Image (cartoon, rainbow, N blue to C red):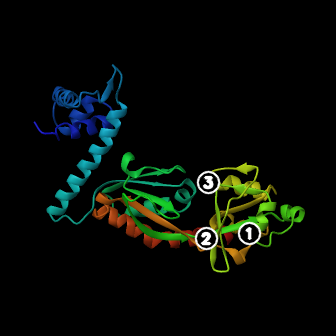
Amino acid sequence: MSDWDGLEEIVAIADTGSFVGAARRLGISPSQVSRIVQRLETRLNAELFERTTRSVRPTELGRMLVDQSRRIIDERDEALSMARGESEMQGALRLTCSTALGERFIAPIVGRFIRAHPRISVSLELTNRVVDLIAEGFDIGIRTGHPVDQRLDARQIGARSLVLCASPAYLAGRGLPRTPADLEMHDCLIGTSGVWHFSEKGTRRTLVPSGRLRCNSGTALVAAALDGLGICQLPEFYVRNHLAAGRLVRLLDGFLDAPEPIWAVCPHRRHALPKIQAMLAALEAELGVEMAAGAAARTG
């Protein structure tokens, strides 16, 4: 008996939702699948599936082991494919990205990637929380700012400019800020970052904004700015069309910080896999084009 025994069976059960479905996929009998899983559960001294007369669902431990097993099987199949000299990449990729950046720019790139590589499937999870790629079994995460997790390799795939702006109505009532320090006298609309960055006489400055509205949605902050509730600092793609139409006014352009880098990060041990290298190359080659095209479409 090998420690590898049972991994394919639990993945097949999770995918098909039953022992019978798993047996059909693997070409063995349902009783054989059941025995293999029972032996694995005995070795682990834990239940991997909740079994009822109507369904079979992984336990929390089962879900974790299924995710890791799927990755192991994927890597095995990819290694064997490479050893056989097969040129077409295959297997699954899991990506995560913030919601707005993912919906507007990353998802179209992923769509073109899977069209070009029909034996690769991609699961793209859009969330504004910082995902632990290793613990949660992701291959690639799209991050902004500066990566700090030493367990991850980082590759810059683009950059985005942050813009400070407010509505004409707000500025008519509260006046124009002339320097970043003036923002302390204004209502700031605060997003996921609690620190705003500026450049003043070649020196990077930080400001902790204060205000009565804080929200993790850039779209909601744009709406608040349009409603005259305060000053926001957001990636340019959120506000470019409103700036062009005069609904929002750019502020403190002379103090803009350098564009914020966008990174693709992935666990060290997966970085060299061909399918991940191909996905990273596509992201690096296409993100800038996708962002420029998206901005042009919204302002044209």
The numbered mark at residue 116 is none
| C-alpha gap between disc 1 and disc 3 | 19 Å
Q: Nearer the viewer, mark 1 or mark 2?
A: 1
| C-alpha gap between disc 3 and disc 2 | 16 Å
Which residue type does callout 3 highlight? Thr
Question: Which residue is rendered at x = 16% and y = 65% of the image?
Answer: 85
- Quarter of the figure with residue 26: top left
Element type at mark 2 = loop
Going from N to C along the chain, the mark reached first, 1 or 3, is: 1
Element type at mark 3 = loop
Left or right side of 297 for 227: right
Which residue type does callout 1 highlight? Pro
Q: Which residue is mark 3?
A: 192
The picture places residue 146, in percent across and down from the top left corner, at 50, 64
Element type at mark 1 = helix
The picture places residue 76, in percent across and down from the top left corner, at 20, 53
- Quarter of the figure with residue 300: bottom right
Other-residue count near label 2 (Cα within 10 Å), few / some / many at <14 / 14–19 / ≥20:
some
Q: Which residue is mark 1?
A: 180
Who is closer to the viewer here, 182 or 1?
182
Q: Which residue is mark 2?
A: 161
Who is closer to the viewer here, 16 or 247?
247
Q: Is residue 13 visible?
A: yes
Figure disc tally = 3
